[in-house]
Amino acid sequence: MNIQRISELRDLIDQEPGGPVLSAFCRTDPRDPANKGESPGWHIALKNGLRAAVAGTGGDHADEQAIRKLSTEAERRLSEISASERGRSVALFLSADGSIDALHTFQIPVREDFVSLDGGPVIWPMVDVLDRGRRTGLVLLSHDRVRLLEWSDGHVEELETSTFDLERGDWREYRGGSARGSQGRGQQSVTHTSSYDDRVDEWRTRFVKAAGKAIAESSADLGFERLLIAADGDLGDEFAEAMPAGVRGLVAEVVPADLIDLSTAEAAQHLDPHLREAWRLRVNRIADQAEERIQAGHRAAGGVDETLFALAQGRVEHLLVDPYLKAEEETLSVGSRQAIEDAGEPSVQEALVELAIRTDARVSSASVDEVPALAEHGGVLALLRY
């Protein structure tokens, strides 16, 4: 997960505002059918959520006035920014005393529109988006060129030097256009076909090895958490096999498609379903690993009680939680209820997520439909450090 984003989240939850905090998440994705009408679905959901927040003040006049003011400001801010600034989802945090004022835009839609009013910011929907948008290298490959794009939080960028040049052994700026032909291509005669094929094979072998090494070095420098390779035919698999073992494990998928000459946006759009599937496979692997460890009785936890206890001790390495978790307080242990109360959070999932962020644990959220193993463990699984 983006280190800067995590730092921002930690700063956000560590603040101690002197009044209520409004957290609003809007699914502003223009491709969502609900947003096609004159009154976008996200705006209607925002107004309804803000109205419910005001209605939940309990009749205290001072609180009601402060919350009305917050709600009015939140609606104004989110309505006045442009569609491009709203992206596919947006998160806004505002406190009554003005100490918290943060707006975040994502190119990955939040799961659903959500408004919360509490003593502190509610961050689990944002953590969910960030986990699905982990920093990824998109490797676009042809027989004599390789382009490397950076994808994070749904944003894709062309790196300053994104195309590897075999002849010079370095990276150069991408210029577009069709792939270069290898030297001598089209000049061979029938009698020299075998010799020509040998040279092509040698060139290809050199290219795959050199480009694989270059991608590995760049991935380490850029801190990529996974790689997606797109290449025609068997070239992508050959390239992945030629990469150093330490980096080969980052390859989430090899997509059989020639995208080398597409724009960054077009390439990202083509690979979007593969990015989503790579995330789904990843969280299921985490769940499977946790279940295997639970059965072995070693370094894993399942369920709210056991996981909260491990989080309180700082033992959780990776938390996996159902964002729709509904745990009844009376079903929890006294220790769990006390941990949630001490954290001062409005929900079990928020307490789990914030404790994980504060103890440097990685966090993923997935529904039981996406990760069936969660259903058997009350919506919570965790890999432990010890």
Image (spheres, rainbow, N blue to C red):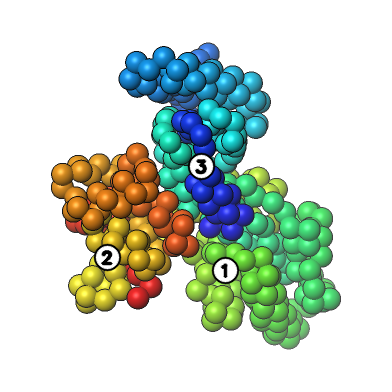
Instruction: Give the amino acid type for the residue marked by disc 1 in the picture.
Output: Gly
Taking the image as shown, residue 314 lies to the left or right of residue 211, namely: left
Q: Position of residue 47 (x, y in %)?
A: 46, 18
Q: Position of residue 242 (x, y in %)?
A: 59, 80
Q: Secondary structure at mark 3?
A: loop
Q: Position of residue 199 (x, y in %)?
A: 73, 83
Nearer to us: label 3 or label 2: 3
Q: What separation in Å lies between label 2 and label 1 (alpha carbons)?
A: 38 Å
Task: Specify the quadrant that holds the C terminus.
Answer: bottom left
Q: Residue at x 34, y 49 (%)?
A: 342
Which residue lies under the disc numbered 1?
Answer: 236
Q: Which mark is residue 16?
A: 3
Q: Residue at x 42, y 51 (%)?
A: 354
Nearer to us: label 3 or label 1: 3
Q: Which mark is residue 301?
A: 2
Instruction: Give the amino acid type for the residue marked by disc 3 in the picture.
Output: Glu
Whichever of labels 3 and 2 marks the residue nearer the N terminus, that label is 3
Q: Residue at x 40, y 51 (%)?
A: 353
Whichever of labels 3 and 1 marks the residue nearer the N terminus, that label is 3
Q: Is residue 40 visible?
A: no
